[in-house]
Image (tube, grey):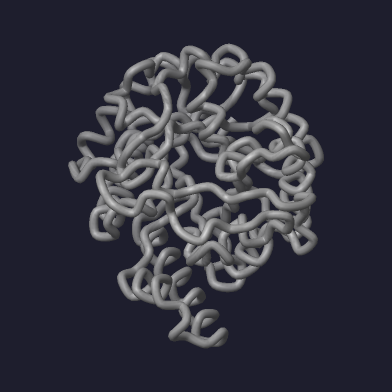
Amino acid sequence: MQPIPLRTTVIGSYPFPAWLEFASANLEQFGSDDIAEMVDDAVVAAVHDQLEAGTDVITDGEQTRLDFNLSFYGYLEGIQPEQASPRLWGPPAHDQRGKHQIVGELSAPHGLGAVTEFRRLQRLAPASEGSPTLKASVPGPYTLSGRLLPNRQYPDRYAVTEALLPIVRKELVDLVEAGCTELTVDEPSMSCYAYREDPTRFVDIFNRTVEPVIGRCRLSTHLCFGNYKGHPVGFRRYAPMFPAFLDMEVDEIHVEMANREYSELEVIGLIAEKRDAAVGIIDVKSYFIESPRHVAETVRRCLEFAPADRLAFAPDCGLSQTARWAARQKLKNMVDGVHVVREEL
């Protein structure tokens, strides 16, 4: 059950301010103290926008992941980072992100950086009674494996995934021990490739990853179809995932609906029989600004399939690739529209 009926939440990422975009492309011009100050300021800005919108759950906006070394991959030992994307020009596509070579045993002796991010959020976000819940997001091992090239030691993606699984699992435990009560394990690669892989194998991987934190926090997973500069990558159907994914040991399953024009909306009813359903109700790939009225109408449609205490509402995906002016207004309108319906209950 949701802590609040028709809860409003976010996935994780939020647009960088323009000055942070510049800084991330020119980090060599800044000292370590400059970067630390910029990151704090960016998190304050992301928190401010979410507080202004009024969401029940907020994150740090993933404002610290400025470059490779500050991303999850930068914390992994045993990999050789790709120096440049294999394709720099032409229409945007996922191949422009490139992949990294594995050159040794995969490990992360200092964690993946998510605990430091969460502690920063705890320090900078309001902590008074009635303040929003603070959430952390971590990629699951299958998704994290997607940009690592298999080798003789790790001959396929599943072998890479198994090597990453204990690393991610420890990060989740460390987050809970740091006081995180709301945790999302992002596995969009599972939703993108469920149509061609064994979904029960995905469920087994996921459940082994989260096993130590089950019951110790509110746990969710985000299942979208990819977003690289507004472009999806997967076969955009939920049918191949269910009913198998209902066995994922989570409190909440987030599904991308707005960009798909609410195709398969009935799946939230299936999810709600066993889990809470978080519905992507804001299209992060479109500059159509959903009005509160539009949002409210869609919430009412969702209530035809699932009860209010099983529903949450969020953007389809993280907002990092949506212009900040649009992200801010979309988030505010989402909350306002949901509140209209909440008052009707």
Vertical placement of residue 303 versus 143, above or below: above
Residue 304 left/right relative to 30: left
Q: Residue furthest front?
A: 152
Please state the total of marks drawn on the protein image: 0
Front residue of 70 and 277: 70
Residue drawn at 58 percent across, 58 percent down: 81
Q: Position of residue 219 (x, y in %)?
A: 65, 39
**Closest to the observer: 339 or 292?**
292
Up/down of 47 relative to 321, above or below? below
Relative to 232, is 117 above or below? below
Residue 176 position, x and y percent, is 74, 52
Tell me which residue sits at (58%, 32%) in the image: 252
Residue 244: x and y, percent? 62, 14
Q: Is residue 49 above or below residue 258?
A: below
Instruction: Name the residue at 22% across, 41% down.
Output: 290
| Quadrant in the rendering for residue 122 | bottom right
Q: Quadrant where the N terminus lies?
A: top right
- Residue beneath the point at 39% across and 23% down: 236
Residue 215: tell me if it is visible.
no
Left/right placement of residue 341 relative to residue 225 reads: left
- Inspect this view and state whether residue 22 appears: yes
Q: Quadrant of the C terminus?
A: top left
Q: In front: 126, or 193?
A: 193
Q: Position of residue 25 (x, y in %)?
A: 39, 71
